[in-house]
Amino acid sequence: MIRKLLCGAGALGGSLFAATTAFAQAATDAASSASSAVATAAATAAASPAAAPALINLTKLSAAAQTAAEATMLNKGDNAWMLVSSALVLLMSIPALALFYGGLVRTKNMLSVLMQVFMIISIGSLVWVGWGYSEAFTANSNATLAPWVGGLSKAFLKGVDATTVAATFSNNVYLPEYTYIIFQMTFAIITPALIVGSLADRVKFWPLMLFMVLWMTFVYFPIAHIVWYWAGPDFYFASIGQPGTPLGDGGFMFNKGALDFAGGTVVHINAGIAGLVGCLFLGKRIGYGKEPMPPHSLTMTMIGASLLWVGWFGFNAGSALESTSAASLAFINTFVATAAAAFSWILCDQLVHGKPSMLGAASGAVAGLVAVTPASGYAGPLGSIALGLVVSPVCFFFVGWVKNKFNYDDALDVFGVHCIGGIVGALGTGILAAPSLGGQGAADYSKFPYISGTDPHNAYDMAHQMVVQATGVSITLLWSGIGSAILYFIVDKLFGLRPSEDAEREGLDITEHGERAYNY
Amino acid sequence: MKFIIAIIKPFKLDEVREALGALGVAGMTVTEVKGFGRQKGQTEIYRGAEYTTNMLPKVKIEVAASDELAPRVVETIQQTATTEAIGDGKIFVFDLASATRIRTGETGDTAL
């Protein structure tokens, strides 16, 4: 996951040598033989402190040398998969999440939800390119801040071009940096979009947009840095113990060994707790608990949930960053955990309410997707099924009982499904990653090629891992909970977050956007 | 002439329309309506939030008929729209003062 345009001195030499050899062979053979030869060189370079990584810009190499170096580092299959995955994750936001949420609100607020999601996606993308990518995925030159937030060295994509690369999980396997930026952009924009479900029916458009820009800047990007940033397998291990990076060139939780494959903490707990704080801050919708507020179209909710399921394969399997068996594992885990969770939710429906509901099936599927997100690359398929079976009853209890008991109006259950499901998933990952339970153990990225598999040299310590997972959950809850509260307060003082009572009663479609969702 | 308003279950509409057509009724007006009677509402549950709807969807049929035809219209609607369960609806009959066909200006039974 490095975003630097770096090549270890040793690795570069190795790759040039290997590439030269490879060029003598048939083109089809070249890639595989070259990459294994380079791998050895790269691993040696990474392991040896003498071969300290040096910053070398590929653009400064001669054209031939640059081509040769790239040929061994970039894999067309990886790049194709990651671009497809990125598009799938965008599909999760629009239309999937927008329809899932939109179907759940009343007719008069349908467009407001669609618009909020659509424009968070649009504005968020600009923020990501502006400073988000740099803030999340670069090293910070300030050693104190480095574990918590990235620097601004790549603000507005400074220094990034079609020749720069970003690390994957395997030594000397890179993605074009643009691909990595695009993939991570889709995560950065869906996360704030998740929050709007809590605020639905009662929030003004422009103040919400301002809140989301601030939230990404002060909450999402730092959390992404804390959990996901690392210098990549070629440089991370050499960076441990170096001045400025005593624990390694990575985020605080990454250095601690937190397992969050695709964003259980970064995306779901993060957005879920921000949603809870938001619905408490805004207060209940007018008429909540007195007037019926049934979903206006469960048909759209079903379409949205189904597209979320499809898009989530890009989210989870794409998070392998390579088109390898790790992606296949994440794919099947995502599939079966979701199926199990949809099933266990409608069982709860049947037992408690006497009928299996469509909304229950859709909610269960989303809860399963949320829970398996951090586990998808570490658990096994049967462990993922267990996770899916467990998460729905927990979320069912939160949306059906806890919400009523504590009387907060989390309109579309962002907290109950995403935050709670995310916590179940984050903690469940610590359990299910254990090789004794069919999991993959702690990943050892210093080996090449990185494949999902148990590391016989490092016994998996579940108790330790659970402490780490719980730490990650706690940091996210605190950072996002407190940060969101401050940001809601500031935006509310400046512009007011809640529409007037009349506007809320009339519906946000007309009062905020001047349109109706349906004219017939 | 009589003006007949029947409130029936929505899924019985086609059956009633066909039966009235066979009887010689040349037209009717149909409206989707909501209301309540002795049939209580339905309970809907969305993620644990229970809503009792006390207004149920029905279909309202309006038919104008000659004095001779009217009793058979009422009888036919009653026989085709019944499920012998609560909530089958009601039939109301009014005296109709006049009827005019807008295209021709005909009045009375010939306008029906």
Image (cartoon, coloured by chain):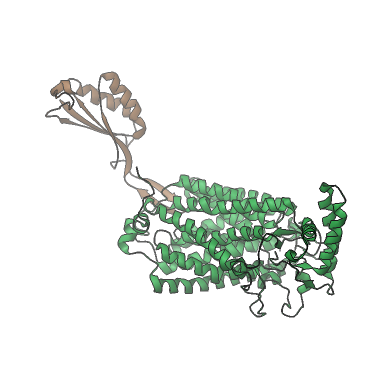
Q: Is residue A470 visible?
A: no
Rendered shade, chain A: green
Chain that is coloured brown in the picture = B
Q: Is residue A346 left or right of residue A329?
A: left
Q: Write the residue at 63% across / 72% down.
A: A153
Q: Is residue A431 visible?
A: yes
Indicate the position of residue A58 as horizontal and vertical percent values: 74, 64
The number of numbered discs placed on residues in the rendered structure image is: 0
Q: Examine the rendered structure and indicate whether residue A385 appears above or below residue A489.
A: above
Q: Is residue A366 left or right of residue A174?
A: left
Indicate the position of residue A339 as horizontal and vertical percent values: 61, 48
Q: Write the residue at 54% across / 65% down.
A: A127
Image quarter of the C terminus of chain A: top left
Q: Examine the rendered structure and indicate whether residue A256 appears above or below residue A183.
A: below
Indicate the position of residue A202 as horizontal and vertical percent values: 39, 61
Q: Is residue A197 left or right of residue A165?
A: left
Q: Examine the rendered structure and indicate whether residue A282 appears above or below residue A451.
A: below
Q: Write the residue at 61% across / 66% down.
A: A157
Image quarter of the N terminus of chain A: bottom right
Rendering quarter of residue B27:
top left
Q: Examine the rendered structure and indicate whether residue A198 appears above or below residue B108.
A: below
Indicate the position of residue A384 as horizontal and vertical percent values: 66, 53
Frontmost residue, A202 versus A118: A118
